[in-house]
Image (spheres, helix red, strand yellow):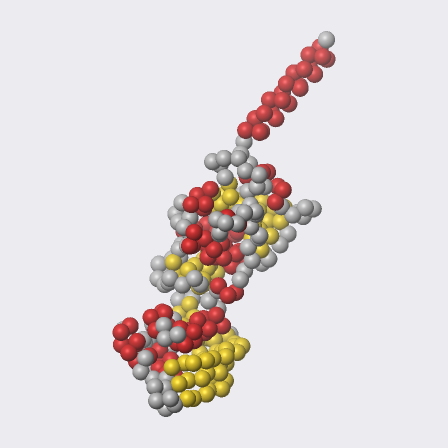
Amino acid sequence: MKKAAISILFAAALMLLSGCGAMVSDPLRAAESTLIPNAGTEVHSAVARQDAGDTYQAVLYFRFMQEELLAQESRRIEIAMDNSIEKALADALMQGPSATSPELRRLFSGQVEVLSAVSQGSTVFITLSESVLSEPMADRFLQMQSLAATLCENCGYEDVQVLVDRRSGPTTSLRLSNSFFNPDKDGAAAPLVRDEKYLLGPYRTAETILNAWLKKDFERLYTFLAVENMPAVASRPPLNTAITEMDAGFSLISFALGNGTVFPNGSKAVLSVDLTLLSGTSDKRSISRYPLTLVRENGVWKLHYEELIALIQRQ
């Protein structure tokens, strides 16, 4: 009888523990089916490091002005002893750029929280709070690109899978849905990958500058002109003056942009470009392999105003 009573009590205890476990919300457990089978999983922030934390020189990606493009900010990130690089980087994106990057814009609203960072193989899983589903539709794609570029570049991941901790109702998957980007689509969104056509590296910046000149979109072109007055280089004039001067010479009617190189200290980049120019008097000029020089200003690649004007007002 004593053995039977002990068995009954043990079974009751197991049932009680199982019931309590079912009541606890565990985003990672609910998302287990989204992870990669037979690959090791690491929950980065689950165990505190036995030190006082660390700092990391990070490259973060934010929107440049009103462009649908991302530019870099280099910043030292403080990593608390109970945090990870992955989560600290994602948290920094939520907080936005620092005051030293006035041309960069935060993409996420202050309502979105990063709940966890889990890596498995070449993929990092980032769980965001449900408030991300209320973010403006126009910002969502670039938001996710900023996450992908930042985490892939700093941590070497091939892709980023975003999970959403939906607490307002039942769900079969925590994966970000395709409807997040397009209400007419369903199903789970594919993992995010770093896409260079949204990143203002030297090539993409030069291409954007030349396209703005080609279309005579001088206000857009003006934002990519260096502000700082470098030695022996004139700084850009006020917008109205610059537009008058940019519209007073040759127009760009075609270009072919080649490869380039970046100076060892990262301050300049030179790209080879073929240009076809046309003046108001039908004077046509072809320039082969012109060395277009970009300078890095506050982390953003720019063109010096005097170099642009020298091309536009070419003799």
Q: Is residue 248 left or right of residue 167?
A: left
Residue 157 placed where, x, y %? 58, 56
In the displayed structure, would residue 70 be above or below residue 170? below
Rendered-image quadrant of the C terminus: bottom left
In the displayed structure, would residue 3 be above or below residue 237? above
Residue at horizontal 44 percent and vertical 63 percent from the top: 69
Residue furthest to the front = 184
Residue at horizontal 47 percent and vertical 80 percent from the top: 255
The residue closer to the viewer here, 110 or 87, is 110
The residue closer to the viewer here, 127 or 131, is 131
Residue at horizontal 53 percent and vertical 35 percent from the top: 170
* Image-quadrant location for residue 106: bottom left
Number of on-image labels: 0
Rendered-image quadrant of the N terminus: top right
Residue at horizontal 37 percent and vertical 62 percent from the top: 65
Q: Is residue 306 left or right of residue 174?
A: left
Residue 147 placed where, x, y %? 50, 55
Q: Is residue 24 visible?
A: yes
Residue 291 placed where, x, y %? 47, 82
* Image-quadrant location for residue 105: bottom left
Q: Is residue 295 visible?
A: no
Residue 32 placed where, x, y %? 62, 41
